[in-house]
């Protein structure tokens, strides 16, 4: 299954890295970054409390019955450059209720900040994206005008395009500021979204790699094949897409055949569609942050003692004692450019679907390929507990 990409070089882990990805990315669709990520959930009020009390997000805006919105309730949560929105249906009918009934809680929208929502929509739809929302000006009265459009990507996930240049309100028309939010958890370093990973059906990875190339002008940064990412039981393949300024990084995974069920297949079986598997949040203090998150009740995947026995030989000095990494369950990896520290939560809702990653980068722009095998073995232990291996 190994494949090389133009000018790609395989490093010692077998990952094929395209050093020219940023230059190859096309600039017909300038994206300033990720504006926000919206989750559709069963209970937005309680999801909001979860992000506040466990993750230290401040609820900054609300939309619902009290703001004249009759079909949904939304809370906007912010921490540094990360904005999350949790939205729940208020009635049994409609697309949000349907979505939650089928998928459980999950990511609905990975929204981009852009300068021109009309050009973004025209460029992407003319290249084959399916429209989710035609360009619209949303009148916020004194707060100005928010411009918005959207297209679909894998599964039922959308990419909205948001232009806030002429809008000065808290999040968008229909939202009101939460003036005295309850105190959020303290002492956590969660700075920005590092990458968002999509899981797609077997055989669809290349289709969505081409989709991000053709429709969004992204380039392929890395290819991990099933020789790299496999255990005795299961495997997956992954390609990482990036935009020209490198701010957007989207790995796309598909399951690969193995003796037992891939964790990607487990996701697909329970989400009942392609969807966003995890979002990585960048930290500059993974030790303090994971310690705090654990105290607050966030559950992380455990790594076996054997992983830490050989870790120092593999990655050298990573600025944190190996014992500390082991106590907290943090993993480390090193490549030609530097090292990274990372950790993965357990799924954050009842279904074994979406989870978070916390990542601290010291030069490395990779995704922790050296940890994939140990990580997937840890996930397989949990899959077996769930009866899903
Ligand atoms: Fe990741």
Image (tube, rainbow, N blue to C red):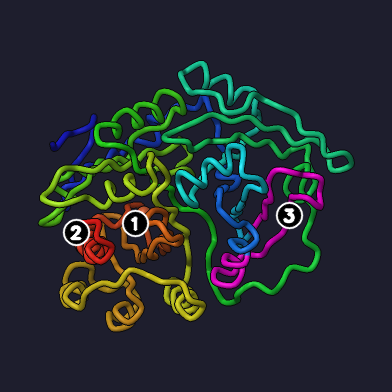
Q: Quadrant of residue 300?
A: bottom left
Residue at far right of view: 142
Q: Residue at x 42, y 35 (%)?
A: 155
> Ligand 1 near label 2 (Cβ, under 8 Å)?
no
Vertical relation: 359 (above or below) 117: below
Q: Quadrant of residue 221?
A: top left
Q: Are marks 1 and 3 in contact (CB under 8 Å)?
A: no
Percent from the top left, x then y, of residue 125?
52, 20
Work out which quarter of the rendered image holds the N terminus and state it. top left
Tag in front: 1 or 3: 3
Residue at far front of view: 92
Q: Are marks 2 and 3 in contact (CB under 8 Å)?
A: no
Q: Which badge, 1 or 3, is on the more N-terminal residue? A: 3
Q: Secondary structure at mark 1?
A: loop
Percent from the top left, x then y, of residue 195?
43, 49
| Nearest to the observer: residue 312 or residue 324 | 324
The boundaries of the magenta stretch are 49-77
Q: CA distance from mark 2 to mark 3?
A: 42 Å
| Nearest to the observer: residue 196 or residue 61 | 61
For disc 3, the neighbor class at 10 Å (few under 14, some 14 to 19, many from 20) is many
Q: Secondary structure at mark 2?
A: helix
> Ligand 1 near label 3 (Cβ, under 8 Å)?
no
For disc 2, the neighbor class at 10 Å (few under 14, some 14 to 19, many from 20) is some
Where does label 1 land, which residue?
364
For disc 1, the neighbor class at 10 Å (few under 14, some 14 to 19, many from 20) is some
Where does label 2 land, which residue?
373
Q: Residue at x 59, y 69 (%)?
A: 56
User: Which quadrant contains ligand 1?
Assistant: bottom left
User: Residue 259 colored magenta?
Assistant: no
Vertical relation: 201 (above or below) 295: above
């Amino acid at each position: 299954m190994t494949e090389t990409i133009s000018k790609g070089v395989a490093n010692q882990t077998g990952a094929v890295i395209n050093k020219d990805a940023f230059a190859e990315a096309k600039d017909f669709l300038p994206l300033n970054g990720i504006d926000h990520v919206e989750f559709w959930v069963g209970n937005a009020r309680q999801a909001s409390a979860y992000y506040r009390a466990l993750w230290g997000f401040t609820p900054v805006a609300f939309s619902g019955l009290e703001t004249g919105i009759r079909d949904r309730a939304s809370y906007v949560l912010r921490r540094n450059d990360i904005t999350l929105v949790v939205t729940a249906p208020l009635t049994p009918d409609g697309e949000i209720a349907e979505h939650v009934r089928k998928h459980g809680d999950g990511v609905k929208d990975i929204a981009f900040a852009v300068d021109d929502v009309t050009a973004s929509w025209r460029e992407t739809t003319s290249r084959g994206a399916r429209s989710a929302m035609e360009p619209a000006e949303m009148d916020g009265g004194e707060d100005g005008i928010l411009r918005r459009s959207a297209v679909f990507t894998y599964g039922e996930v959308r990419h909205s395009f948001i232009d806030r240049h002429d809008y000065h309100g808290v999040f968008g028309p229909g939202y009101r500021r939460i003036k005295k939010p309850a105190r959020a958890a303290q002492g956590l370093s969660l700075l920005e979204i590092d990458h968002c990973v999509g899981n797609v059906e077997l055989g669809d990875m290349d289709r969505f790699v081409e989709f991000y190339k053709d429709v969004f002008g992204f380039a392929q940064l890395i290819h991990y094949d099933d020789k790299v990412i496999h255990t005795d039981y299961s495997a997956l393949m992954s390609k990482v897409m990036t935009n020209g300024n490198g701010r957007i990084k989207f790995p796309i995974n598909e399951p690969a055949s193995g003796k037992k069920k891939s964790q990607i297949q487990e996701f697909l079986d329970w989400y009942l569609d392609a969807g966003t598997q995890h979002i990585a949040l960048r930290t500059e203090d993974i030790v303090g942050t994971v310690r705090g998150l654990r105290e607050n009740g966030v559950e992380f995947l455990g790594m076996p003692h054997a992983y830490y026995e050989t870790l120092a030989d593999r990655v050298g000095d990573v600025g944190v004692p190996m014992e500390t990494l082991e106590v907290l369950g943090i993993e480390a990896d090193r490549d030609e450019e530097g090292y990274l520290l990372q950790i993965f939560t357990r799924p954050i809702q009842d279904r074994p679907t979406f989870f978070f990653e916390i990542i601290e980068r010291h030069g490395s722009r990779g995704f922790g390929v050296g940890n994939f095998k140990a990580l997937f073995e840890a996930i397989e232990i949990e899959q077996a507990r769930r009866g899903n291996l």
